[in-house]
């Protein structure tokens, strides 16, 4: 059985998470105090940790960093109260794998949990299966089987880099992607590419997929941090 540790001090959220996750077939342990989160997470042999940011005695950022420092590899999803907190999560080196912003939809959280468990390995009880191969947004389709981008059914001329970049965005829809993360995903580590190169590719992608590239709906700039893709 998949075991999830929930560290959350707001009883309403904690109990609704507990019942929702139990309904999904997960075993849940609740903790409300930041001070005991690290020892419990290290000892409990959990498959995943849901970690609130604002906690009594020790905040979620600190807890997460400490867990990573101790070598714990268990996936961590941070529960953040505000968007700027969420952006901080990705800007700082907390070691968290993902985040959701409150109020989050239970459905979205379940999807995030399944994705992380799948990535983490065979502990997953979920459906598994092939990753999504066609992403649809606006009048566009990104088809990763044929590796092409279509708009209103017509194939658009696109470079391999543009398609890889768009695929990275589509896989992480709704989430902030820092420029460093995009560099890793698209160019791979060890390749020297400047931020400007990413920005230029984003500009050319916007011309292809946005109705009005000057006021993008899909490829959103997050000032000072990176980009977010909204389907
Ligand atoms: Ca809290």
Image (cartoon, rainbow, N blue to C red):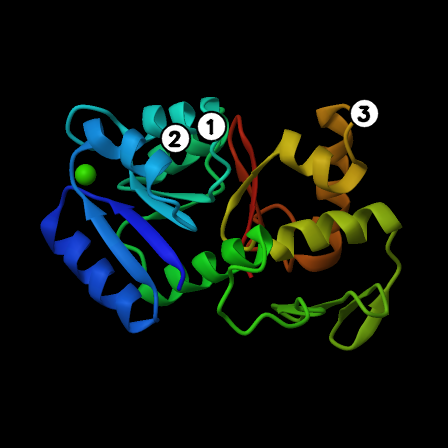
Instruction: Give the side of residue 92 with respect to residue 42, left or right.
Output: right
Separation of marks 3 and 2 at Cα, in angstroms: 26 Å
Name the disc covering residue 190, or none.
Answer: 3
For the N terminus, the quadrant is bottom left
Q: Return the mark for residue 18.
A: none
Q: Name the residue under label 1.
A: 68
Label 1 with label 2: CB-CB less than 8 Å: yes
Report the image quarter containing ligand 1. Answer: top left
Q: Quadrant of residue 121?
A: bottom right
Q: Position of residue 132 (x, y in %)?
A: 66, 68
Secondary structure beneath label 3: loop
Q: Residue at x 16, y 34 (%)?
A: 33
Asked if disc 3 is less than 8 Å from ligand 1, the answer is no
Q: Position of residue 164 (x, y in %)?
A: 78, 50
- Foreground residue among 42 and 109: 42
Residue depicted at x 28% and y 36%: 40
Q: Is residue 139 above or below residue 164?
A: below
Label 1 CB-ligand 1 distance < 8 A: no
Instruction: Check the image and report above or below for 81 versus 63.
Output: below
The residue depicted at 78 percent of the width and 65 percent of the height is 144
Q: How far apart are marks 1 and 3 (CA)?
A: 23 Å
Q: Which of marks 3 and 2 is in front?
A: 2
Q: How far apart are marks 1 and 2 (CA)?
A: 6 Å
Q: Is mark 2 within 8 Å of ligand 1?
A: no
């Amino acid at each position: 059985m998949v075991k999830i540790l929930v560290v959350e001090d707001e009883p309403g959220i904690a109990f609704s998470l507990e019942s929702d996750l139990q309904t999904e077939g997960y075993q849940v342990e609740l903790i409300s105090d930041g001070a005991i989160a690290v020892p419990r997470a290290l000892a409990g042999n959990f498959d995943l940790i849901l970690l609130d940011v604002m906690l009594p005695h020790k905040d979620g950022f600190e807890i997460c960093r400490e867990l990573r420092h101790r070598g714990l590899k268990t996936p961590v999803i941070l529960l953040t109260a505000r968007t700027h907190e969420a952006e901080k999560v990705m800007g700082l080196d907390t070691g968290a794998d993902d985040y959701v912003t409150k109020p989050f939809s239970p459905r979205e959280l379940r999807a995030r949990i399944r994705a992380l468990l799948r990535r983490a390995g065979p502990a997953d009880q979920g459906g598994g299966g092939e990753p999504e191969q066609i992403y649809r947004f606006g009048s566009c389709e990104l088809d990763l089987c044929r590796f092409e981008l279509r708009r209103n059914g017509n194939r658009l001329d696109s470079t391999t880099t543009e398609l890889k970049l768009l695929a990275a965005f589509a896989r992480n829809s709704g989430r902030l992607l820092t420029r460093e993360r995009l560099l890793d995903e698209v160019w791979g580590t060890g390749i020297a590419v400047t931020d400007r190169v990413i920005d230029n590719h984003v500009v050319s992608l916007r011309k292809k997929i946005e109705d009005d590239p000057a006021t993008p709906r899909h490829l959103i700039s997050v000032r000072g941090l990176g980009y977010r893709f909204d389907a």
